[in-house]
Structures are given as structure tokens and as C-alpha cells.
Image (cartoon, grey):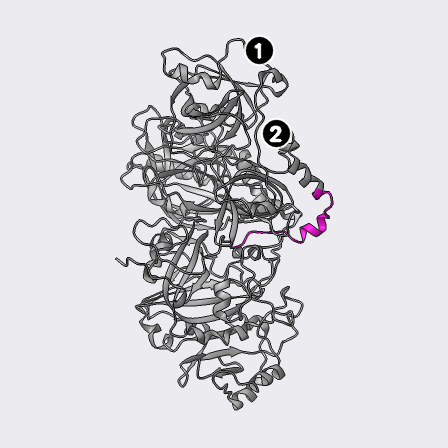
Amino acid sequence: MTVSEMAGPADHSDSGSGSALQNVFEKLRSTHTLSLTLTSPLCLAVVALDRYLSLQHPSGESYSYDLTITDGRWRMKCQLADSLTRWVRRGSLRCGTGVLVSLLSLVHDETRLSHSYLRIDGIHSVVELPERFLSIKDVEKVPQWCQDYVTRSDGPLQLSRKYYLPLWINDDPYGSVWIPNNPPPDVAIDVSRITLVADLDVFFHSSRRPLPLLVRILHRSRIRYYGKPGQNIDFPFQVYCEVADQSGVMSMVVWNDLCLEWFNRLTVGSVLYLQQYSLKHSYQKRSRPQIHTLSLMAFHSIEICLNPRSPASVVTVIPPKSVQPQWGLPDVPYNFATRSEVDSMNNNQACDVIGLVTYVGRVELIRSKEKTGPEKFWAYRWVHAVDGTTDSPFILEIFSTSQPEIFNNICPMTYLVCTQMRVCRTGCSVYLTSSTETQLFITGCHKKQPYVNEPKVKAFIQWTKTLKDSVMLRRTAVGGHYRYPPAPPTFTPTTTNSNMTDEFSITAVAELKGELESLQYREHRRVAVQGHVAAVQFHIWPPPQHEPPHSNRQQEGVSERGVSNTVPAIHSSTKDEMTLSQRETDTTSPDSDITVAPKRRRVQTGSRVHFQYFTRSKMQSNRYNAGMQVAFTSREEEEQQQQQPDEGELESDESEETDQTSQVPDVQQAASHPIALWESRVWPLVKQQVTDHICSGRLDQESIPEKFHFDDREVLLHDLNLSAARWNPDLTSQTHTHTPVACPGYFMLTILGLNQTAAVDVLFVPVVSSDDPRAAGVPDTQHDNSLLSCISSGRLCVQPDGSFPAPVSLMSSAPMLESERVVCIVDLCLLGEGRVEMMCSKLYRTADICQPNNTQ
């Protein structure tokens, strides 16, 4: 925005009357410091978030953000101060929310004439969108501030940057600078003077410019972004393709500006006529697709380079109808494998698969391990697909393939094709992970693809014709916490320079707070902590209707102080703060050192097991799919259990039992407390000494997979994908009924660090039904249904009578954890809006821990 344009609103005062943005600008124009602190924070709606590579900043931030905001009358693009970018990275500031702005500045670009823009330097809090903004149906119809604004609206306010990056990752095409894939026009080419791939080596070792090439694209990589702060390259992108003619296969690398022009048009199977390309030594350390079904020579010593200048390469895409058979171009090679064949394939072997999608996980992020350049994240999701050759699904780990329109729209009941997937074998687990060259195709994209005539593709289509949609739909699910492969049966801590993928480094419990504070939105991180299990609680789920499902969500907004000084929803509790027992119950028994609530109770003094019982045994018989009885046993059942003494005599207080029999609490009231609780002997003695108790709160709705419904497809995909860079009022206003896959309850484990100064609460949700997507990846091995066995295996085992054990019976084995040193594998994920997921995926006993040879 130029300084002269600042006066624009005054010329439209009639249309802009009542505009909060106009009032702010009038105040900024009258100040001499170019900075304005608002006495009352200004509430604006966030319309768009755009990210770009930072300039060299002392703060060390890798990326900067431009925000498009609106007051309902005008919309305007502003820059977000670098000190506030954490609001975006942690998922608190997102499109479709309200932001209370407290400090603004006017910034002039001193290297250009008449270029200034507004910068947001202070945010008071982020709030739910006020009602007055809900009338906005089309953001584009809200007039942009200063309609004579001539600076290009699709580029960063810092004009030294010419493009925006996707909001969360760097390897997707984003913005109007990327030319779409339009049908190629009819062209006339001269094929009388072309060279072959096999003859390029002659040109490489001479000064002659190589003749034109006529090749077909066999594989295409995802986009590689190599931008760095201080770099002078306008568009630092790179894409490589494997191209071939009748003489051989060679890599073709597309550089910089040409990526924006040609990436979307260089599709697999396309035929290219290349002129004015260059040749150079091939980069040997990059990955390459596996091409075993093509009997052609592969040339890896040199590669074809398409450059925007010196010389400017000329690329022509030949329309499919103009491709002549006499050119002898090879067909795109495929190696489709069925699910039954994958089990016998070698590790890292490449294959192509087709299947009917039955499960789609949420999109998450992991940090790139690259040690140079700005911080990067990879986006990935887990997908299950079946092909009818076996009851087991393909378990697919799919990373972003620079096809956002496909990656973000994978949903159940679609036909999914994944090419160049790699087999991963870890112990008894087999899954497929995408490679740099993987391409995705879903229903609506298959027409005219080269693979449609593959025999296994045709066989799959024939199988799908025998299916009933209603039957398959019952097998579908989306979202929830999902991790694969399962942790190995024994724990091996990492040693120096260890590259073993099944080894973990151990994080001190006290250091977990730092791990959580460094998490970014939807980032997944797996850590291992060691200590002792100090307490175990069992909670029913879903929570009662009168309680919000996101019990740890901040309903009133996120304050600036909260973001900067604490981890949202993670409480670092001192000995002056409420401890576990104080949170969950009212009094403490001095004899047994266990927590006692003023409800009907049973106490096992020897092992400190505390259960609460309510005479509602039939209430949930139809509530839980898995047939799991959730601790609401009748008095007769209790008496029968008391007549069968187990290890340690069970004692009951008869007077209290008589008093409490008539006081039957409501089920919803009971659900706010754990219905079963065990504490170790040590925990009541040391919990007041714990200086850091990290608590994640109760189970979040987003952690539980839910059933898929066609009518809710758009809103489900919106929730599963990363938060969008553009506000869609119509989509964000939609709601749907969350129908969870079988989850009758969850366990909360308190892990006390070995030094007894820090503790952490982690959640464990056992697999109790084959409808749970995690059941496909959890070994179906029988165990004794002890609590430790369930947590170690991840699932409950069906009893001889066909039912699952009740949580109270599981908790009766909790004393086995007494004094047992354990290593707990914890999956961390910041769900956004101050919600952190901390899930226990494996618990190792002392006997399952391998001591490293080198302990230094």
C-alpha cells in the first residue's frame, strides 16, 4: 500500500463510514511515530494467511506471514510481525477466527517509491469469530482497501519476494504464479533432425549444441524447494523427470522459473519435444524410481537440464492424438502388486497399487532432517485400502506428492492408485510408504491414465462390481490418533551415530515441557521416557453431553501471554498446585494412602486399588459396540467378586456401604471423575515434591476415529486436512455429528520420572473392535488381559465367552506395575488451539529393555 493510497478511504467516506480499519488508518496518519497502540483491541476476522521465506532477520525466523483481515466493510493485507509468527505456527491464529489487534505500525519500503504497508505488532488474543462476521458468505465480495491498489495482490508485501509458499509445507505448487495444466495446442514439429537419448553423451563431450529430443515422461518427482534467506534466486524450485525414447532412459531436471510454467503440464505419459536444453553431470545422491519392467538402458552419468535462461529451453507438449506409433516411444512402465503379493516382497522394493479406500487419517507434519537452509516440514497421512485379494488392507504412508488437489481429497469409498510405493518391513509389520516419485490418482482422475489397461487394474475393477456400497461403507472410518508400525517388542536406546530405525533416544520427563513448547501445529513427534507408573485412571468415553468434548480447549480465546509463556493445555504444576488425587477426589484415606471419593467403594489395602461402582449394569449394554462393560456393576456382581478373594484380601466398609447404597449418582456426574483409580505406594509420598506435572487433559475428540458419511464428506475433509490458507465461510460454518468408532474408555497413566521431580500424564486407548483402524496394525496375539499386557500390545483380548474384560478387572492387575521401571513410548501431536495429544503407544518393562553396549 502506498502512502498516497492511505488517503483513499477518505475519498470513499460514505461507503466506508463505520469502518474500524478506516478509523485505525486515520489515527496512524495523525501519529508521528508510525506506531499505534490501541486502547481497546480491534477485533478483525482473518481471511487469508500467506507464508513466504523471510529476509535475513536477527530474530532467526525462517518464514514471514502476510494476513488478509477484514472488519466486515473492508479487507486488507497486512504483515505479521516476526515476533508473532508463533501464533500461526502453533495453530492458534488461523483463517476463520477473530483476532484482537492491540498494536499496529506503518512500514515504508525505503528502497522503492510509494510502497508502504500495515504491520500487526501486537495481538491481545484470538477468539471465536464474532457473530457480525457470520453474514459474510463470499470473502471476495468484501471490497479490498483502496480499490486503486496497484501492487500485485498475489505476492508478498515485501516486494523482494515474488511468490508465496503453501501455508505448512514447501513442496506443493501454490498461487497464481503456477500455470495450470491446460490441454496442449496442436503443433507441427520436425522429427527429421532429432537425436536419441543414447547419443547425448557424444554432445556432452563436445562443444556442439545437442539436437532436439523427442521423449516420453515415465516418472515425475515432487517439487523440491531450495530457497534460503539471503538468496538472490527469484524462484528456487526444482523438479526432475525420468524421460525415455526407444534408445534409453535419462533424468531431466527442470529449474527455477520453468517449474512454475511447466510443472502442472509435465504429467506422466506426456510426450515432449525439447530444444535448447543443456547437459551436465548427474547428481548421484538423489533418489531414483525403480524401473524393472522396461528393457531399456538407463543412463545415470549425465542429465538433461531445462533452464529459464542461458540458454532458455523450449518445451513443447505433443497432444496425445498427435503422437505417432513410428516414433517408437516406450509406454509408461508399471509394476502393480496385489495386497496378497506385498507380504512376499523385499524391503524397499517398489510397486504400484490400486485399492478401495476404507480409512483416511488426518494430515500431520514431521520435521525434515535437513541441517541446512530454513526449517522444513513434510506432510503425510495414513490410508487403508483393500483390493479383495486378502482381508488385510494396504497400509499406506502417503507423503505430499505436490498434488494437493488429490492428496487433500483422499476419502473413503474412492479408488486410489499410488505409483512407486516402497515396501517397508519392520519385524512382522509390512506397509508401503511413498517415494519422491510417487504419483496419486483418485476417483475422477483415472480416465485416460496410462495404467487403465493394466491386467491387475482391470481385475480390481471387476472385483469392485461385486461389492455393495452399504456393506463397504460400514467398514470405513476417518481421522483419529494413528501410528504405524507398532513399536518393537524390545526397547533399544540409541547410541552415538546410531542409524537404527527401531531405536529411540530417551527424553527426561522434566525435558518434555521443552519438547511440547517446540511443537508446531499438527507436528508429530515420538519420544521415549523412563520412570515408574505412579497412578492409573480409567475414564469412560465419550464424555457426558453436558461437558464439552474438548475439555482442554480454551473457550475464551488464547491470550498473547499464554502463547508466549506456556504451552496451551499443558500445565506445569508445582507442589502448590492441584495434584492428581486432589483433582479427581475429595478426601484421602490415611490408612492405605489411596484416594477415596465419597461414593460407594471397594478398597484393596495391600495393593491400593480403588474402584467406584454404580448400580447401572444394564445402562450401557447397547452403548458400546465392543461389548466392553465399563465398571457399572450391580451390587450382586460386586458381592460375587468379593466372595472370590484374589491376591490381597478385599475389605469393605459395611457402614459406608449401607449409607451409600441409596445414593446412586447420575452417570453423567460420575463420568467427570475416573471410574477406576490405582496409585502406587510411592505416589502419595512424593507427589507434593513434583515440581513439573505435565497434564494433557482428557481425551480429545480429534484423537478418536469416526465413521465416514457421504453427506459429511466436505466438512470431514476440512477437519482432516491442515488448516487452510483461505477462509471459506460456507465450509467452516458446517457441522456434523461425530460418530466415534468403538471407544468405551481410555486409561490415563501418570509416569513419574526416576528423580521424582517431574511427572507426565499420558493417555492409552486400547483397541477393542475390528472397526478401529488401528486393529489392522496391532498384532492379534493372545495375552493374559493384564493392564501391562494390554498397554504393551495395544489391544484387549476376547475372553472365552466372547466378551472383553471390564476395565475394573484390568485395573486389578495394576499392582503389577508397582516399583517396575518402565520405558514409555509417547506420541506427541499439537492439534492446534491449545490442544496437545500425548498418547502412550508402548510400555516396556525392565525385562524388555536392552542395555546398550556403550553407555557413554
* Front tag of 2 and 1: 2
Residue at x 58% of width, y 26% of height:
331
- Do we see residue 235 in this rendering? yes
Residue 108 at what x, y percent from top left? Answer: 32, 31
Residue 29 position, x and y percent, is: 35, 34
Q: Are marks 2 and 1 in contact (CB under 8 Å)?
A: no
User: Label 1, on which residue?
Assistant: 188
Left or right: residue 635 versus residue 346 is right
Q: Nearer the viewer, residue 234 or 586?
A: 234
Pinpoint residue 175: horizontal percent, then vertical percent. Answer: 48, 31
Considering every residue shown, the one lying at the far bottom of the view is 655
The disc labelled 1 sits on which kind of residue? Ala
Secondary structure category for the residue under label 2:
helix
Quadrant that contains the C terminus: bottom left
Q: Residue at x 38, y 78 (%)?
A: 681
Q: In the image, is residue 418 above or below residue 642?
A: above
Please state, as top left, top right, bottom left or bottom right, where the N terminus lies in the image: top left
Question: Depth check: 591 or 470 in front?
Answer: 470
Instruction: Tell me if residue 174 can be seen.
Output: no
Q: Which residue is mark 2?
A: 450
- Residue 365 shown in magenta: no
Report the amino acid beneath label 2. Answer: Pro
Magenta residues (range): 463-482
Q: Which sits earlier in the primary sequence, circle 2 or circle 1? A: 1
Q: Is residue 465 magenta?
A: yes
Query: Disc 1 on helix, strand or loop?
Result: loop
User: Quarter-wise, where is residue 514 in the image?
Assistant: bottom left
Q: Report x, y in % for residue 394.
A: 58, 47
Q: CA distance from mark 2 to mark 1?
A: 24 Å
Q: Is residue 685 left or right of residue 185?
A: left
> Residue 549's mark?
none
